[in-house]
Amino acid sequence: MLYGRSLMPPDGAAKASGGHQPASVGCQPPARFARFLCVKIKPQRKSPFIDVAQYIFLFPMTYSQLLAEAFHAKKNPVLVGLDPRWESLPMSCRMDDVAESFERFCKAIIDIVAPLVPAVKPQAAFFEQYGVSGMSALRNIIRYAKQKELIVIFDGKRNDIGSTAEAYADGILGADSAWGADALTISPYLGDDSIEPFVKTAAERDTGVYVLVKTSNPGGKMLQDLIVEGKPLYQRVAEYVEQLAQRTSGSVGAVVGATWAEQLSELRRVMPSAPFLVPGYGAQGGTAADVVKAFHSDGSGALINNSRGIIFAHRTETFMTQFGEKRWQEAVESATKRMIAELAQKPEK
């Protein structure tokens, strides 16, 4: 992460520091403040009573600021999906216990992609299917990714009402929660009282939630494209997500599939304040030309997910001949770099 950019402190901070102004000098916060913005304040005048060269203020980093910092550091929007499947694992990662194998494999993936991309997205279902051991592996993987300074999006598509939604949010979001994730995917189809508990927790903990708006699977249109009072349902959901994104300064985002290029462009216009999570790139058919519509003019505003195309790159026709299974790590690295290069070409919107 990058720190120490010339930032104005929140209202009242300059007053509290005796009118001193922020200086554009860097400061690295202690590890326990890894999710804080660090601003150094230089006094405008010397004090005969206090021998102090500068004051340091730490302000919580919002989820939108975390995304911006990660994008600035890695200079690309690639999100690597951690979706381990036993039948696709390289033999060198297979152990007697499936959950241990998944943990070993995903940690190896993280080692490869951490220097290259801003974020990873573990899919909870692939771990939960193996019970306690699988869930323990997932927690270890999330911790490991955080140690590597990656943003972690917990892909659980959770949803419920009242205290149940509060419990989901409390357990998943934030460094001090049971799972320790930076963000969570949620479903909107129980209504606003099922979304608000997630939004409240995300805002309080400077984390994020991504609401399913227009998903990449073909069957999503069965419900999402239904016309409600003259508009498709997904657009109604998008309008509500935009309200939440504005209210929370970007803690609420949208899941919009790369497989719906026309709607992706439409939904960016409807949700200018919401960060996008865009699945469907690569194996599902989405291309760089499709996903360019998700970005703002400066190239920010979206994370583009690729799961199978990266983590199982050694099984694809492109890399199978070049690397084979024994060199699967090199295939992962090459696939990641290729995706970064494809997105960097910035085809016309």
Image (cartoon, grey):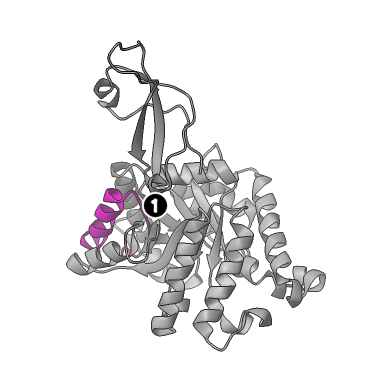
Q: Is residue 6 above or below residue 138?
A: above
Inspect this view and state whether residue 121 appears. Answer: yes
Q: Is residue 103 left or right of residue 327?
A: left
* Quadrant of the frame with the C terminus: top right
Residue 63, percent from left and from top:
39, 47
For the view shown, which residue lies furthest in the right direction? 322
Residue 280, percent from left and from top:
55, 64
Kind of residue at badge 1 = Gly
* Image quadrant in which you'd find residue 164: bottom left
Of residues 13 and 223, the one nearer the viewer is: 13
Q: In percent of the image, x 39 and y 64: which residue is there?
A: 224
Residue stretch rendered in magenta on the structure: 187-211
Q: In percent of the image, x 39 and y 60: which residue is there?
A: 181
* Residue highlighted by disc 1: 253
How many numbered discs? 1
Q: Is residue 160 magenta?
A: no
